[in-house]
Amino acid sequence: MTTMPEAAASSAATQSEDIILEVKNLKMYFPVGSGFLSRKPVGYVKAVDDVSFTVKRGETLGLVGESGCGKTTTGRCILQLYKPTAGQVIFDGQDLTSMNTKTMRGMRREMQVIFQDPYSSLNPRMTAGNIIGEPLIVHGLVANKTEYRDKVADLLTNVGLNPYMADRFPHEFSGGQRQRIGVARALSVSPKFIVADEPVSALDVSIQAQIINLLEDLQEQFNLTYLFIAHDLSVVRHISDRVGVMYLGHMVEMAERNEIYRNPIHPYTKALLSAVPIPDPVLDAQRERVLLTGEVPSPLNPPSGCVFHPRCPVANDTCSQILPELREVETNHYSACILSTGYGTP
Ligand code: SF4
């Protein structure tokens, strides 16, 4: 069986032009101090612990898991908003983790982020036009005021807003419209890759579909690649080509979208999927429910062996002693569970 880093390495070697992002053995540990005056860490919050995956050019990788599973930290490490504790982030063939600040500043144009909360992520004192146009000035992408205004008007149109709205302030927009402004700002520097960090979680269900459809249209129009982070498997289903499931800093399953919904292998994915409502009441009544008990353990003191074992409905005695690796159990379908892979690190 192939592990995810091995698969990533061989796939990157054979189809390097198709791989835009490669994350290798990424770790992000946050030090925890003992008190106000002490700088010496007494422990580490293992927010991301040895995560590897690749993203192909033009695809959407959905990253899901409960809050605190490390998906947002993974996104921030990719964007180098956090300096990873260990591991590599290779974007378009360049290792971002070993890049100096000046070179990284240039790379930031290529990688943008859409934030979760459209209410707090926009500066209330700036007009929509200035919020969208600010990156154009920061990166020196416009030569004069006319070009600036035209570009901002184009960006507003691209996200379904009217150019005359450029002079309005964030409080004059609805939640969905504010998120469209956030999308336009991310698009302004013509990025190749966007981390969409729970971009619809703060919106009404009726608006969520509109923003997801907008992101899909823009992806096609501008050949964008997305890392789409969500806590809900039903949200990523529509937009993702592949889905990765994270639990307590580890990637526990990854597969093509249809495969993971039709044939979930990891007990945690099964539990998450069994909580997703099905519109058909007959099918909904027939399906097996997997109820998880207890809370997600603290990443400051994660359980030994498989980190899911205290909540896993099918755990056995070995599970607390062996850390299962993410391994290919079916073609392009990876799982980190000893019941499916039989592999692990004692
Ligand atoms: Fe459950 Fe054990 Fe598999 Fe972990 S390794 S998911 S505890 S069965």
Image (cartoon, helix red, strand yellow):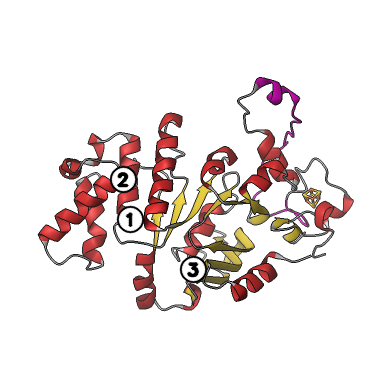
Label at residue 83 = 3
Q: Which residue is mark 1?
A: 187
25 magenta-colored: no
Which residue range is magenta in the image? 281-307
Query: What whole-number distance in Å separates the C-alpha atoms at marks 3 and 1?
Result: 24 Å
Determine the CA span between mark 2 and mark 1.
9 Å
Q: Position of residue 223 (x, y in %)?
A: 41, 58
Q: In the displayed structure, does residue 52 sit left or right of residue 290?
A: left
Q: Residue at x 66, y 42 (%)?
A: 261
Q: Earlier in the sequence, mark 2 or mark 1?
A: 2
Few, some or many residues within 10 Å of mark 3 (<14, 14–19, 20+)? some
From the viewer's side, name the closer residue of 336 and 345. 336
Residue in the picture at 34% in, 49% down: 183
Q: Secondary structure at mark 1?
A: helix
Residue 211, given in percent of the width and then of the height, sits at 40, 40
Identity of the amino acid at label 1? Answer: Leu
Does residue 227 appear to the left or right of 128 in the view shown? right
| Residue at the spot 53% in from the left edge and 67% down from the top edge | 18
Q: Is residue 147 above or below residue 119?
A: below
Quarter of the image with the N terminus is bottom right
- What secondary structure do most residues of the magenta stretch adopt? loop
The answer to whether any part of residue 123 appears in the image is: no
Q: Is residue 266 left or right of residue 86?
A: right
| Quarter of the figure that contains the C terminus | bottom right
> Which quadrant of the figure has residue 133?
bottom left
Q: Which residue is mark 2?
A: 159
